[in-house]
Image (spheres, helix red, strand yellow):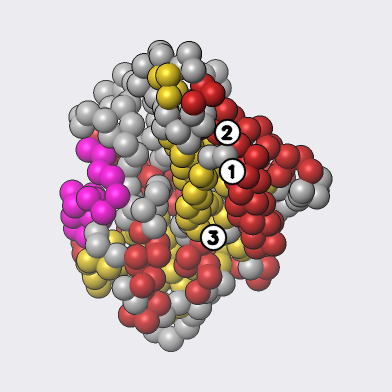
Amino acid sequence: MAITASPIGTELLRKMRDWRRDIHAHPETAFCEFRTSDLVARELAEVGAVVHRGLGGTGVVGTLARGDGPVIGLRADMDALDMQELGEATHRSTIAGKMHGCGHDGHTAMLLGAAHHLAGDTGWRGTLHFIFQPAEEHAGGGLAMVRDGLFEKFPCDAVYALHNSPNLPFGVVSTRVGTVMANCDTYEITVTGKGCHAAQPEHGIDPIVAAAQVVSAMQTIVSRNVKAIDALVLSITQIHAGDTWNVVPNSVQLRGSCRTLTAATRDLAERRLREVCAGVATTSGATIEVEYFRGYPACVNTETEVRLAARAATRVVGVEQVDTSCVPRMGSEDFAYMLEQRPGAYVFVGAARAGDNPPVHNPYYDFNDDILPLGARYWVELVREAMPA
């Protein structure tokens, strides 16, 4: 891998590692990132950035200005996950039931490192907004910041974000023009029948049988209603019913997730889900109610900004390590709300380790500190590319 010499000094690399591991040991989940935002604000102030706190709840924005020129925003997420860490690293979570299982601790450390470096770098001109966002995982902190006036208070010509990826070879930077992450919706289906004795089902309306028919029929939405070249993931992740062996319950609750890449497929999936449930209700005699919740929109990159990001990444890892035609991922990302407001680019940075390499959202996952200098250097080169002195 042709990684060029990093301009990030040894002392700054040590600080980045210390920040990352400190944040990892003290994970904070959605809108509760108080300690983390304190650390971020303190480090931004130390390099002379003008610091604004409280946007989107616990969000932090630090601004460095150097004369007239472009205005860009660089975003990192700060929140952890509600899950128990099982790894044995010395910096493992000290808070039961919470862990940095997605690498936002590393994202925060890399952007802080870039801010420290860029504060003394003469190779750029304009205004930089360092955006540290809460609640990416499920609570829409990106939307909260936008609604709180992110781009009114901190106008940006473009915005950029990155995410570590243990699924990619170390040092590969991957992105694409257009949709890079999926729409994310959730649904709750309540099937209500008529409870009865399990030995006398003819006296009731069995909601479990009806729910099973819903589960089976839903699979045909993907296999028979969507073009083979379109993407749709329709997953049932929860089924709740019954309390004992000899009672047919009165109701069943199904919950799940719907992931799509286009607005048309998103609309089709919701419509067909409702139609399937209505059809099963008619044939079974049960009552079926569907609540469908539109979640994060698709994360859509713009061409000019992707090309700029690719040029910056090439300076760091070499042209052979930069992929600008990656396959869209069916995961979701609330940076999408910022991309709805401004052009920008979202990239993945390969973080694979040799041997055991747990994926994100795994209880044994831990951010790969070896990509800290790559991420910070990417931010530095992106600023130099977008805002040359």
Q: Quadrant of the N terminus?
A: top right
Whether residue 247 can be seen here: yes
Q: Position of residue 158 (x, y in %)?
A: 52, 73
Mark 3 is on which residue type?
Answer: Pro
Examine the structure image and report whether residue 27 is included in the region drawn in magenta.
yes
Q: Which mark is residue 210?
A: 2
Mark 2 is on which residue type?
Answer: Ala
In the image, which residues are magenta? Answer: 26-42
Relative to residue 206, is residue 8 drawn left or right? left
Between 282 and 324, the residue placed more toward the observer is 282
The alpha-carbon separation of the residues under discs 3 and 2 comes to 31 Å
- Crowd rating for badge 1 (residues with CA inside 10 Å; few <14, some 14–19, many 20+): many
The alpha-carbon separation of the residues under discs 1 and 3 comes to 30 Å
Relative to residue 203, is residue 154 drawn left or right? left
Q: Look at mark 1 in the image and give the residue it sits on.
A: 281
Whether residue 252 can be seen here: no
Q: Which of the 4 image quadrants contains residue 240?
A: top left
- Crowd rating for badge 2 (residues with CA inside 10 Å; few <14, some 14–19, many 20+): many
Between disc 3 and disc 2, whose residue precedes?
Answer: 2
Q: Residue at x 77, y 48 (%)?
A: 225
